[in-house]
Image: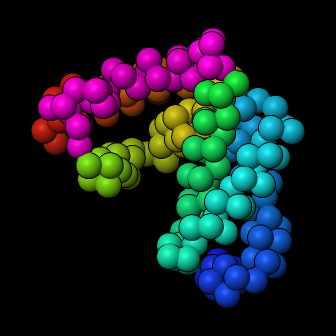
Amino acid sequence: MEDEKIVELYFERDETAIEKTSEKYGKRLRAVSNGIVKDIETAEECENDTYLEAWNIIPPNEPKTYLYAFLARIIRNISLNCCRKKNALKRNAFVCELSAEMEECIPSPDDMDCRIDDMVFAEIINKFLSELDAEKRKIFVRRYWYMDSVTEISEKLLLSESKVKTSLFRTRKKLREFLEKEGYAL
């Protein structure tokens, strides 16, 4: 079923919207969540919470042309919140590692001079990603959106781990330079 028709079902408050969403995107959404929480049962709970959240916010939102991205953002946030709750006393080392990597090139949200509007920043990141070749973009997105490990990325993309690490390092450096060129103090 097309995304537009699924969104229309949400607007009609037809419960088959959730069923159709699950059929079309359930496996992909669980994979995103499982990559973060590293537990299939928790990922399934996050998936169900995603459907509930979508049910509650689709009217007024109308993600007809970007339903998967809309759902992926929801499940990613739910999964990260789940990790935070589970690791309230001990920080998840993997998430800390990714945060440290990105601190090199993304402005600190605690610095008032560096605070920027999320939508503008997203446009700039999208512009940066669109200028990367397909392989580098896939590596970067797999690492920082899907939170795949270097090993997982190398296996999925059939690349050596050293090539993945080098690509990530160089892409972060390019992102930093790109953001500085766009006027963001780092």
**In the rendered view of the protein, which quadrant contains the N terminus?**
bottom right
Would you say residue 119 is visible in this rendering? yes
Which of the 4 image quadrants contains residue 116? top left
Residue 45 position (above or below residue 171)? below
Indicate whether 29 appears above or below 64. above
Locate residue 81: give its quadrant: top right
Q: Is residue 154 above or below residue 16?
A: above
Residue 69's spot in the image, x, y percent? Answer: 56, 59
> Is 19 in front, or is 185?
19
How far from the left and from the top, in percent, is residue 4? Answer: 61, 82
The number of callouts visible is 0
Magenta segment, which residues?
87-116
Q: What's the residue at 81%, 79% (across, down)?
A: 16
Q: Is residue 150 magenta?
A: no
Q: Nearer the viewer, residue 180 or 16?
A: 16
Residue at 62%, 67% (x, y): give it: 56
**Residue at horizontal 64 percent and vertical 49 percent from the top:** 75
What is the quadrant of the C terminus in the image? top left
Q: How is the image coloured?
A: rainbow
Front in this rendered view, residue 64 or 62: 62
Q: Residue 131, can we see it?
A: no
Q: Look at the image and say whether residue 112 sits in the magenta stretch.
A: yes
